[in-house]
Amino acid sequence: MSHNGSRGIVAIEGAFAAAARQGRAALITYLTAGYPTQEATHELVRALLEGGADLIELGVPFSDPVADGPVIQQASQQALEAGITPSSCLSLVAALRDQGVTVPLILMGYYNPILRYGPAAYAARCAQVGVDGLIIPDLPPEEAQPLADACAEHNIALVYLVAPTSSASRLAKIAAATSGFLYVVSHLGTTGGAHDLEPALVAQLAEIRRHARTPIAVGFGVSRPEAARQVAQVADGVIVGSAIVERAACGADAVRDLVSELRAALAH
């Protein structure tokens, strides 16, 4: 069953535009697929939607998650032990679509499993099941051509990450290559640290904005409604990951409550 109506890049851009029309940043929430169990993931996705998530990232567990913090690493390990695979993550998306989930779904994972699957075959399968975008933290644009071509063919967003410390030329290159949105990796101090938006981040986002051709979303280190509210003043989207995965162990109600607090913080 193909889900290519207004899916892919169009769906992601549409979600950002809808949030902007409401005068707020989009809320992008992250779950590790298959954590704490594959069955639980369905219930947790519903909790994200009930809480008000605009886009959902599903983490594809991998044995060597270099870009993930301890919370997500542990969740990935548990999901792998429970038998989740890159293929079952794709089946999970198909099942969510069949259950009527319409929000943009983005798979976040590492390149090695995609390379093994075959980039062209993977992008085709993503389009078939209703994946709208991919985030591959360990794949720079220079090495992405086979996957980028396949994603373009199927209208799937290939979202690149940029560090605020990147040089201007690097920023320009990544901003030009990304589709759907630009993922700005920001370490907003340590978790539980200062609430105030660092002036350096504000300046860096202004610089990134000069190069960006897509919406800008900020992630890594946003865990509380207050931090989300601050980031929302300077970005088009706020990405929350570890804080939601931590709550996932406590069940759907805990996740829904956190997401609705985050969503309320984004309403200007």
Image: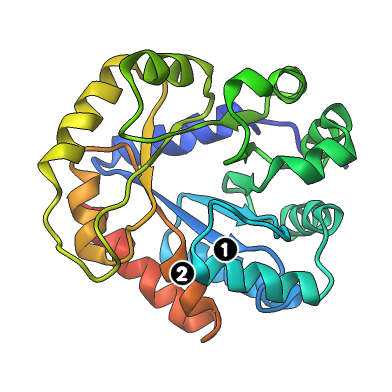
Q: Residue at x 72, y 57 (%)?
A: 62
Task: Judge the density around disc 2: few (<14), some (14-19), many (≥20) Cα neighbours within 10 Å.
Answer: many
Q: At which x and y percent is residue 86?
A: 81, 53
Colour setup of the view = rainbow
Name the image quarter holding residue 223.
bottom left
Real-space Cα separation, disc 2 to disc 1, in angstroms? 7 Å
The numbered disc on residue 163 is none
The amino acid at mark 1 is Leu
Q: Helix, strand, or loop for circle 1?
A: strand
Q: Quadrant of the N terminus?
A: top right
Q: Residue at x 86, y 53 (%)?
A: 87
Q: Earlier in the sequence, mark 2 or mark 1?
A: 1
**In this rendering, would 120 be left or right of 194?**
right
Q: Say which of 54 and 209 sits in front.
A: 209
Q: Which residue is mark 2?
A: 244
Q: Which residue is mark 1?
A: 31
**In this rendering, would 91 be left or right of 6?**
right
Q: At which x and y percent is residue 37?
A: 72, 78
Query: Is 248 rendered above or below residue 180?
Result: below
**In this rendering, would 49 be left or right of 193?**
right
The amino acid at mark 2 is Ile
Query: Is 207 rendered above or below residue 134?
Result: above
User: Would residue 2 be visible to someone looking at this image?
Assistant: no
Tell me whether circle 2 and circle 1 mark residues in contact (CB < 8 Å): yes
User: Would residue 16 be visible to someone looking at this image?
Assistant: yes
Q: Helix, strand, or loop for circle 2?
A: helix
Q: At which x and y percent is residue 40?
A: 68, 77
**In this rendering, would 63 be left or right of 175?**
right
Q: How many marks?
A: 2
Q: Say which of 242 and 102 sits in front.
A: 242
Q: Residue at x 35, y 68 (%)?
A: 260
